[in-house]
Amino acid sequence: MEKTLIVSKIKNGIVIDHIPAGKALKVLKVLGLRGPEGYRISLVMNVESKKLGRKDIVKIENKYLSRQELSLVALIAPSATINVIKDYEVVEKYKVTLPDMITGLIKCPNPTCISRKRNEPITSKFYVLKKEKIMLECYYCGTMISGEEIEKYITV
């Protein structure tokens, strides 16, 4: 069987690969990419993968990710890899990783947590207890959030 590219190569930008099948749209959402920003974005969903069985891929031309954006991708797709593209060549490749502490990206699900109070000048903080099957713990009240729940509480 002949191998062909489903989506054309990009000159400069990033390719987010090994996204679990069905999560690519959520990755774009947490990155705040809706379309009007002007980036050319290619999205492939449910393609075959030796590693995952099925996976999604996102290509974003002329965009590179900040540390905060990488943490957001890791929350949604902890198995993702980032390929940095320059002049059509992969110049860097790495797996996303969560930091040990996540600050300001997730709101605590506990409505009585001090980080949810309007008059408190406190930014939410979560310890990352497990990085593979994600488990977070609120720094202030100890409330736990598992990987499946995280998407509901992302504040960006």
Image (spheres, grey):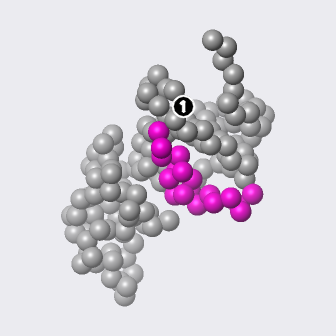
Residue 17 drawn at (x, y percent) = 55, 36
Quarter of the view holding residue 118:
bottom left
Q: Is residue 56 visible?
A: yes
Q: Is residue 135 left or right of residue 69?
A: left
Neighbours of disc 1 within 10 Å: few (<14), some (14-19), many (20+): some
Q: Is residue 81 visible?
A: no
The dominant secondary structure in magenta is: loop
User: Residue drawn 28% across and 45% down?
Assistant: 130
Look at mark 1 in the image and give the residue it sits on: 47
Element marked by disc 1 = strand
Q: Nearer the viewer, residue 7 or 67?
A: 7
Q: Nearer the viewer, residue 99 or 82?
A: 82
Residue 82 drawn at (x, y percent) = 56, 38
Q: Is residue 93 magenta?
A: no
Residue 11 drawn at (x, y percent) = 77, 37
First to last magenta residue range: 21-38
Residue 38 in the image: above or below residue 64: below
Q: Is residue 34 left or right of residue 40?
A: left
Farthest bottom residue in view: 119
Residue 20 drawn at (x, y percent) = 45, 39
Q: Nearer the viewer, residue 135 or 147?
A: 147
